[in-house]
Image (cartoon, rainbow, N blue to C red):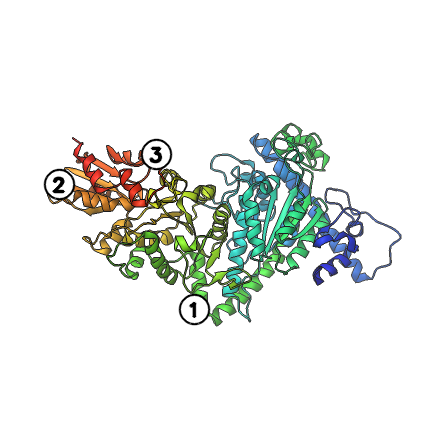
Amino acid sequence: MLTPMNSQYLASRSLSCQTLLNCTMKFSTLVVAAAAIAAGVEGFSTAAPRAFGGVRQATPLKMAETATEVDKMAALATSANEARGLAMDSIAAAHSGHMGLPLGCAEIGAVLYGSQMQYNPKDTQWMNRDRFILSAGHGSMFLYSWLNLAGFDLSIEELKNFRQHHSQTPGHPEFPNSEHTTPGIECTTGPLGAGVSNAVGFAVSEKMAAAKYNTDDHTIFDHHIFALAGDGCFQEGVSSESACFAAQEKLDNLIILYDSNEVTLDKMAEYTQSEDIIKRYEAYGFETYEIDGHDLAVVEETIAAAKASNNGKPKFIKCNTIIGKGMEETEGTNAAHGEAGVPYVDKARASIGLPEEKWYVSEGTRDFFAGVQEKNGKIYDEWQSTYAAWKEANPDMAKELEDAVADNVMPAGEMIKAIPEMGGDAEATRVSGFKIIQEIAKLVPNYISGSADLHGSTRNYINDGGNFGAGFDKTYTGKNLYFGIREHSMGTILNGIAYHGIFKASGSTFLVFVDYLRPTIRVASLAELGRVSYILTHDSIGVGEDGPTHQPVETVSGLRVIPNLDVYRPADAEETVAAYVSSVTREDGPTALILSRQNLDQNTDMPAMERREGALKGAYVAKKETADLDLIIIATGSEVQHALAAAKDMPGARVVSMPCMELYERQSDDYKETVLPSTCTKRIAMEAGVSAPWYKYASKVVGVDRFGFSAPGDIVMKELGMSAENLASEIATMN
């Protein structure tokens, strides 16, 4: 059934009803002939506007409007070709890069940055800007070219240094971090399928912010999320998982642009895919369009229609394009994907009307984008006035929002004091986590959490937080997200929420399934996303009866090798407090919280606050020796209780709890020496997992270097050596 918007849109484009099967809008060159004639320009033409006879006489006002439209379309066409030139020149200079997408999607870029997106290059952190994600990150020169043309602080010199050391134009787009601070990059992309899935997280965050902060009198959030993706993105399964979530939760602020060029790297796309992707996305619940991606008028009107359609359906626009368009030697083939076109750059530049001058941008294009900035500047200024009025009317809400955007939270040392003591009863750290997350949600108002269909087991549901989404008992203000059985998608959506820059988000699953989302954790670590964390429960062979398929042994260590990821495996409830607090106060990277299924003893011989303070440093002395130090026992998680028990009758033994290796390594040398003095080399470590990482700290390790088996957890633990008795026996063999 067509919405009123769609009916009006089609009437304006002189389309027949037969072109709209199942709300799929298909446009061809013939269909939009009238618009092309009115504009007098095609997306790939450098010719002057053409005159046509035999048309109705127009009023002076109509003629002026048409002339203005022709001028705009001509400027967009010119900028598209100059963007092609910038990409070709930069890739040729680097002798490296992917030329196909920047050439094939130039008209899409022209419409987005020259007509349809609201942004302010002078304030790249404006919270109500439209977001653009280049999911096909290998085509990064597309993005860099348009950022330069659109007026962002990305100079031609930076384009000339494409893919060079210390440049602001790395091979794939990188979210601003300690390595690159390129303005206008919203998302680190490269792994195919990830960016278009991150876009779903952006859309979640925008919907949540609009529901939470907009009022009847003032609209603060009403922007759109655009993602440009290619065949590889849609072949990767994560994009399908995320599309299902987006449609289920009616994220109609999401607009996906599919660069459908019928080419993949090895072969033409038909070699490996044959499905009707339009029907697939219709089945998910998207509103779909199919257009000529080189027809500027159609691209513009279709994106405008997608933006105006607030019907609860995310949008999917299939843009039929020619990869490498303008370079006849490679266009339309898989050779266009990379830098194979470098030898033909000069010929291609001449064929699209560019002068010999490399990295050429005409004065007309600069003037045109100055006008775009002026137009967007008025939108920006109006928004600032609205925001000021909203802030005056809602000072408490404004303080909360500004703190969220600035990532202002209570310091960790204060936050651990604001959470009540947990008590002395034996308790699984996942259960402790449930109690703690309630406190975290109160102390950090922008904290949200979700689960891959495991809330009942992972215990990260925020009481009284409501559920996010559409339908049933869900609203867009809900703090609990139900991702379904989609761990990979959960990871990409969490990253998208973090990139968007308002909320802090965590997601949960069983630790053994973390490999489903491992690629997203790697990117979060690379992008230094401190706003995201992972709650991973059922942490060892202690899982028991479910057997080795559900008993992680290598998984914790597999996470520890990811640079810039803090991996916390707390030993008791008080250490779990520190772990959660660290995860929401860390600013430069994500945190994985590794929690137990089974009950653990509490180290009540040590005050709760000392355990919290020690755990915030990654490692601390959990039991100090009562005689001359002659042995250090290092343990983590559920094995700390065994270390404490084994050391009970060893006066010269010190027990060190090390819940987070990474955080410990960031402490001063002086502090590390107080915990693990270099004078004591007789050290043994214990963890219910593979032993390799612990040899950095100990000469002997009691670990689990095999898969487990199905039996009650306590039996599996005992049989595989995770007991105080076995630890004591191993210590007895040491010299």
Q: Residue furthest right?
A: 54
Where does the image place residue 546, in percent across and percent down from the top left?
39, 44
> Mark 3 falls on what kind of element?
loop
Distance CA(mark 1)–CA(mark 3): 55 Å
Which one is nearer the viewer's eye here, 578 or 714? 714
Type of the residue with mark 2? Gly
Where does the image place residue 340, in percent across and percent down from the top left?
62, 29
Task: Name the mark on residue 652.
Answer: 2
Which one is nearer the viewer's eye here, 373 or 735? 735
Could you tell me if the residues under marks 1 and 2 are in contact, i.e. CB atoms within 8 Å? no
Q: Quadrant of the N terminus?
A: bottom right
Q: Is residue 667 visible?
A: no
Q: Residue furthest left?
A: 627
Distance CA(mark 1)–CA(mark 2): 56 Å
Could you tell me if the residues under marks 2 and 3 are in contact, i.e. CB atoms within 8 Å? no
Where does the image place residue 134, in percent across and percent down from the top left?
57, 45
> Mark 1 falls on what kind of element?
helix
> Mark 2 falls on what kind of element?
loop
Which one is nearer the viewer's eye here, 362 or 575? 575
Where does the image place residue 32, in percent across and percent down from the top left?
78, 50
Which badge, 1 or 2, comes first in the chain's sequence?
Answer: 1
Q: Residues within 10 Å of mark 3 (few under 14, many from 20)?
A: few
Q: Is residue 223 visible?
A: yes
Q: Is residue 466 left or right of residue 43?
A: left
Circle 1 residue: 396
Q: Residues within 10 Å of mark 2 (few under 14, many from 20)?
A: some
Q: Is residue 397 left or right of residue 81?
A: left
- The structure residue drawn at horizontal position 30% and vertical position 48%, both measured from the top left corner, is 570
Q: Is residue 656 left or right of residue 467?
A: left
Circle 3 residue: 706
Type of the residue with mark 1? Asp
